[in-house]
Image (cartoon, rainbow, N blue to C red):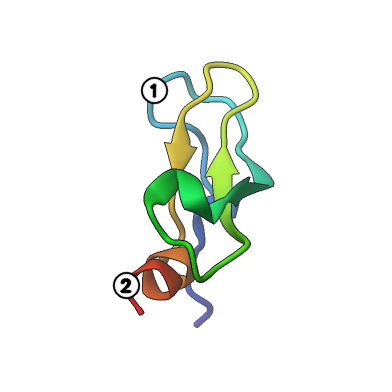
């Protein structure tokens, strides 16, 4: 059974569909990466971090 990712979910704040977006990693204090992928709500600006992004930020 496939695992559901943040990109398939709706925003927990407003219910809109989330979109895939790349954000500069230095905004999170990670200078070793250029960018990380997030699921972002185009309606309210809510931002969610997929497990793959969290793993990259931890390493």
Residue holding disc 2: 58
Q: Give the structural element (helix, strand or loop) at label 2.
A: helix
Residue at the left extreme?
A: 58
- The answer to whether residue 15 of the structure is visible from this angle is yes
First-in-chain label (2 vs 1): 1
Label 1: state its secondary structure: loop
Lateral position of residue 57 relative to residue 36, left or right: left
Q: Position of residue 29 (x, y in %)?
A: 38, 53
Q: How many numbered marks have been drawn onto this rendered protein structure? A: 2
Q: Which mark is residue 5?
A: none
Q: Nearer the viewer, mark 2 or mark 1?
A: 2
Q: Residue at x 43, y 53 (%)?
A: 49
| Marker disc for residue 13 | 1
* 2 versus 50 height, above or below: below
Q: CA distance from mark 2 to mark 1?
A: 26 Å
As displayed, is residue 24 above or below residue 35?
A: above
Q: Position of residue 26 (x, y in %)?
A: 49, 51
Q: Residue at x 52, y 17 (%)?
A: 44
Residue drawn at (53%, 78%), measured in percent from left and top? Answer: 2
31 or 51: nearer the viewer:
31
Left or right: 22 in relation to 51: right
> Which of the image's four quarters has the C terminus?
bottom left
**Residue placed farthest to the front in the image?**
31
Q: Position of residue 15 (x, y in %)?
A: 50, 25
Q: Residue at x 67, y 46 (%)?
A: 21
Q: Nearer the viewer, residue 56 or 38?
A: 56
Report which quarter residue 17 is drawn in: top right
Closer to the camera in the image, 6 or 59: 59
């Amino acid at each position: 059974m496939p695992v559901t990712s943040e990109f398939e979910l709706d925003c927990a704040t407003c219910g809109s569909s989330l979109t895939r977006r790349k954000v500069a990693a230095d905004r999170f204090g990670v200078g070793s990466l250029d960018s990380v992928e997030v699921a972002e709500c185009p309606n309210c600006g809510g931002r969610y971090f997929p497990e793959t992004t969290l793993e990259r930020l931890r390493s």
